[in-house]
Amino acid sequence: MKRTDVGFSAIGLVLASCMAASYVRAQNYPSKPIRLIVPNAPGGGTDTVARLVAEKVSPALGQQIVPDNRGGAGGGIAAEMVARAPKDGYTLLLGSAATLITGPALIANRKYDPVKDFAPVSLIGTTAYMLVTHPSLPAATIRDLIRLAKTGERQITYSSTGQGGPAHLGMELLQAMAQVKLLHVPYKGGAPAMMSLLQGETFAMIANFLTSLPQVREKRVRALGATSLKRSALAPDIPTIDESGLRGFELEQFYSIVLPAGTPPDIVNRLNREILQRLATPEVRQRLAHEGIELRTSTPGELGKLNAEQFAKWLKVIEQAGIQRTG
């Protein structure tokens, strides 16, 4: 009996010691500036989100969060850098679909695992896309588009920002769910893809809100639906593709903060707490909305589940569509 009592006492001392160490670490963190790796060049939505996080969260931590732009390889260089960084909370990644979801899914031999190699901290925001068509196409709704495609009376072409990009993958998902076949015409970037649609060279496109909404308001293109599950606050009058008949359809850009896997939970939770508190303001919402981004935060667990589900979803779309994976 005495041995058992001693054993339990020893275990209790070890647990108490670990809890004390965790408390001290959380209290002392951070003791130096934190790097926030941005997988893109300066400018654009990802960079804007990173700098907004740095501006609002740094004062709460008592140390500067310093954005560090490391573009290249579709975000892969930045992601691999963070995945291999020390697990001490001083190297963050501003994740996006390109770095944590669709990008890795398009590479056969990835140098990092987008789910296992990162510790999720918090979702920051989302951006929906919009399915738009040329006014000459006799389809005012998603149901009309699907019905027209199934008749086979005409070949419906759609433009995209390039092979494997969000616009392409979104249309592949739509085709798979609706059981129709459209003709893909890839372009090098959003501007030429939209120009093709405006000129009637192609008849449909999934485009970001900032690019497509002005064209919709000027009636140069027709909006068939937003790609988010809920209507966008940026254009609440435009129905979602999901509510228009294609239940479960969803395509969004996700912005999030992650750390290297194995980072102590107390550091992860400290960062999550400060992000949730400091970003929940009308000013932050307005500044993100200017970039076409809706503020959306989460717990670490919610973000981890989201990333895993999204990665599996788009990997399946890529495989079913027969899109060639690189690497």
Image (cartoon, rainbow, N blue to C red):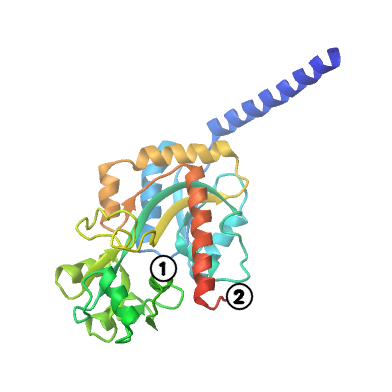
Disc sitting over residue 61 in the figure = none
x and y, in percent, of residue 78 in the image: 53, 62
Amino acid under disc 1: Met
- Disc 1 is placed on an element classified as helix
Residue 5 vertical position relative to residue 17 in the rendered view, above or below: above
Contact, CB < 8 Å: mark 1 with mark 2?
Answer: no
Residue 190 vertical position relative to residue 56 in the rendered view, above or below: below
Residue occupied by mark 2: 327
x and y, in percent, of residue 159 in the image: 34, 80
* Residue at 44% over, 45% down: 64
Disc sitting over residue 177 in the figure = 1
- Disc 2 is placed on an element classified as loop
Residue 28 vertical position relative to residue 147 in the rendered view, above or below: above
Number of numbered discs on residues: 2
Place residue 220 in its image quadrant.
bottom left
Q: Nearer the viewer, residue 274 or 321?
A: 321
Amino acid under disc 2: Gly
User: Is residue 123 shown left or right of residue 26?
Assistant: left
